[in-house]
Amino acid sequence: MKKRTILIYFVLTMFTVFALFPAYWMFITSLRPLSELLNPVPWVFSPTLKYYEQVFTGYYQIDLFGIQVMNSVIISLATAFFSILVSSFAGYSLARIRFPYSSWVSKMVFFTYLMPPSLLSVAFFEQMHNYGLVNTYASIVIAMVVFTSPYCIWIYKEYVKSIPIEIEEAAIIDGAGRLKTFLTVIFPLSAPVIVALSTYAFLYAWNEYLYVLILTSDSRMFTAPLAIAGLLQSDEIPWGLVSAMSILFSIPPVIFYYLVQKYMIRGLVAGAVKA
Amino acid sequence: MPKQYKDWVVGVIFCLPFIILFILFIVQPLLLSLVYAFFDKRVGVEPVFNGLNNFLFALNFPGFSYVFQNLIIFVIFGVNIKMVIALFLASLLNEEFRGRRVFRSLLIIPWSLPMVPSLVIWRWILDTDYGFINRCFLLLGLPQISFLGEYQWAISMAVLYHIWRSLPFYSLMLLAGLQSIPYSLYEAAEIDGASWWVKFRHVSIPLVKPVYVIATLLSLIWTMGDFTTIWILTRGAPADTTNVFSTFAYKFAFQIGNLGAAYATFFMLLPLVFFLIVILLRAIRE
């Protein structure tokens, strides 16, 4: 028994090293002066905060980074807001109201969840081009809401189902309509799941690369991932700077996943298995 | 108005925003892609029917044939190896031992990192001149390897990145599946004197199989649509050999300006994706 436990520790440690090394290396790179990056003897390490300083003071290669981070924030907030707006109503409806073809709506939700976004990207770009929405927040937010709402609808629906129906019946007996019942009874009760889902939607938009790439051509409309990836196009890639930007950019998602890991996976498996 | 009637109208209205988004931004782009695959299509220009020319253009484009090969490589090596390792990892994490939670929270980090930063760091680690691995090789007196400059290496590294990144997600999914197996089944097997392997083979595997199948299908579908991995890691280099369908379509649409060829590229993949989605929906219902 003892031997087996040691073996488990050993194997899991190997996996953990493999899983964590890139993040560790990103962190180390962001602290190493240029001379060490170009001649990295592992035991020589004199940390510097120079790259972080460059990120915050707007180094010449990334003079628009401040604007681009703001774009990321605006787009992510808008995605979270509209995604919740769309999916809480739909999720409530699917959980509680019987209406014809509601199973078709469920199918649409699943189909959208499963559809790889990249396969629609060119046509989506063309549509947005025809609407004159290229290089606007609106086009990116629409795309993000389309791709985040299925998961949100599904999880929200499951959540509403877990709320005892008697609570609602009391409100309905008091003469409240569906809208009022939803807004005053169910929505406040579902605050925890709303927080989790809006964070999910926020981060989906925060991490998005492809749709921002195709829908923007003006560097003032770029988001942070595009700014980071864009530096790879320079002749001398400033690895230290790229790493510092990557570290700062990755902090919100990593913290979030750490906090909700159990919840997310459970919801996903429940969603996938129960369907 | 009778109450029953009103209620279903409200139900539909609540779903309407999603339905509208679905029709406008899922159905419409899909139909556009399928139809315009047969048209000469450029941005802002009226489409002209041109039969199978887009397909011929794509198929004759230098390096295009690699997308089929790369898809197969991703499916066979990426998805399957990942799922087997994920099942192994999940069954380790399902054991009782101290520090299980710590391992679980650490192992999820690759999945929680946004793709762009993690791909950028992979590129840096794999850099030919100054990357960590080649530096180690240098210290050990081994020859440097151009990881992203040779086809075999570049595609292997893309597959390795794919496994590295999505392993946590699928491991935790399978772990949830394993945890739903009643403990009494294992106890019964233990009374019969079953070894670890016998329990794994005859209790865990059959009961986790539905989740395993669903997870594999999910992974297949999403892997087929993965754009960012290849685009950031190799951008198709060397010489357009490491491209996948979506990166080639991007190249056709936005670098060459031939939207029709991009649609034709998607057209070759979409039936397979639909087929897998249908199978997945069936698997879920059972």
Image (tube, helix red, strand yellow):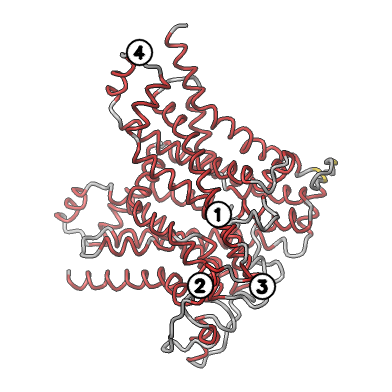
Label 2 element class: helix
Q: Residues within 10 Å of mark 2 (few under 14, many from 20)?
A: few
Q: Earlier in the sequence, mark 4 or mark 1?
A: 1
- Furthest residue to the left? B191
* C-alpha gap between disc 2 and disc 4: 60 Å
Left or right of residue A169: residue A145: right
Query: In the rendered structure, are the residues bearing label 2 and label 4 in contact, judged by CB atoms less than 8 Å apart?
Result: no
Query: Which residue does the image show at 79% across and 59% down from the upper left?
Result: B60
Identify the residue under disc 1. A70
Question: At which x and y percent is residue A176?
Answer: 37, 16
On the rendered image, what quadrant is the C terminus of chain B found in?
top left
Mark 3 vs mark 1: give the one in front: 1
Label disc, if present, on residue B277 of the rendered structure: none
Label 4 element class: loop
**Tag 3: amino acid:** Ser
**Tag 4: amino acid:** Gly
Q: Earlier in the sequence, mark 3 or mark 4?
A: 4
Query: Which residue does the image show at 53% across and 76% down from the upper left?
Result: A240
- Chain for mark 2? A
Label disc, if present, on residue A234 of the rendered structure: 3
